[in-house]
Amino acid sequence: MEINKNININIKSIKSLPVPSELRKILPIKEEVEKNIQQSRDIIKKILNQEDKRLLIIVGPCSIDNTKAALEYAKKLRNLKSRLGKIFIVMRTYLEKPRTTTGWKGFVNDPYLDGSHDMAYGLREARKLLINLAEDIPTATEALDPFTIHYFAELLSWVSIGARTSESQPHREMASGLSMPVGFKNSTDGGIEVAINAIESAKNPHCFLGINNQGVISMVKTIGNSWGHLILRGGKNKTNYNEDDIKYAVERLKNKRLATSLIVDCSHDNSQKKSKNQIEVFEKIVEQRKSGNTNIVGVMLESYLYAGNQKIPADLSQLKYGVSVTDECLDWETTEKLLIYANENL
């Protein structure tokens, strides 16, 4: 598309992409898959409402970087979940990554990990992956770009709004119209008020500019999402998952007349961004649940096929398969032991 230099002086190029309705025609979902997704959403709502006593565990790679590795990981989860009746497993399928300054922005933005930014391919392969996964296991992602979510929202069972965007009005508006439960993370400084305000905001109706399925700029009116909830992820190198932290969060939610169910993110500042520290966080959350704290309804774990993380090398042939290219992750063997531990101790 031709760029008007007088208006877009800092724009290098603009390239049209397929609109959401086009990808839905190319990659439709089966009726059975739709039923699976709706069923998993209903289960998560019951867990949030403390009607279903299972512990919600949202587990998987920090970010999707390779669809083959994601499918291999999902197969391991699927083979395990049928043996674990006291927990409900949802797989992390994070396709976009927020950056504090610069860096790889995720599979949708740069699926080849080489700076080529083939977003058309990224959107298509992301939708294809979610369709494949949804046949066997519920999926979750972070809703980062208000436009991107339109390409695969109907395939997701749970969505989070990140620590950097919980204060963002466009993200609160977007969440108010989403059809699945939405978790809001506390701020990077550790404060929970922003996330609590976001839950309250998203619970109410909104009117805003957005896009429709044909990619046309539209006026969007929502009725509000009553399934917003708090995610505690720590902040400023401090944790917020201990009993006093949970009690404080519950009191603040009560004061706002909001649901008191919450999720603990075992990663990020709760683990000082060290994957092995997630083990201690996870075990302490299970202990609190076992002691009768029903306000903790879920946990998040960052886990992949192999432990640790890696920088994306200039020579992509040196990229290690199944190792995170963003935050550190636990390996599968450790993850499996933790999931079994939770099931046996709840």
Image (spheres, helix red, strand yellow):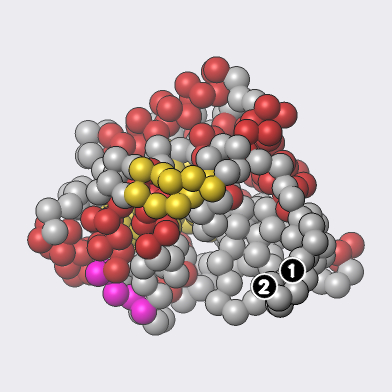
Res. 39 in view: yes
Q: Looking at the image, which residue is at 33% across and 75% down? A: 190
Residue 339 screen position, x and y as percent: 46, 46
What kind of secondary structure does the magenta stretch mostly adopt? loop
Q: Give the residues drawn in magenta, as a range.
A: 189-193
Q: Which residue is drawn at 76% across and 55% down?
A: 15
In-front residue for pair 220/74: 220
Amino acid carrying label 1: it is: Asn
Quarter occupied by residue 304: bottom right
Q: Does residue 114 appear left or right of residue 66 in this picture?
A: right
Q: Which residue is drawn at 36% across and 43% down?
A: 221
Instruction: Answer left or right for 59 relative to 314.
Output: left
Contact between marks 2 and 1 (CB within 8 A): the answer is: yes
Left-right relation of 153 to 287: right
Total numbered labels placed on residues in the image: 2
Q: Residue 7 carries which label?
A: 2
Q: Position of residue 271 (x, y in %)?
A: 44, 71
Q: Where is residue 193 in the image (x, y as percent from the top left)?
A: 25, 69
Mark yes or no: residue 335 visible. no
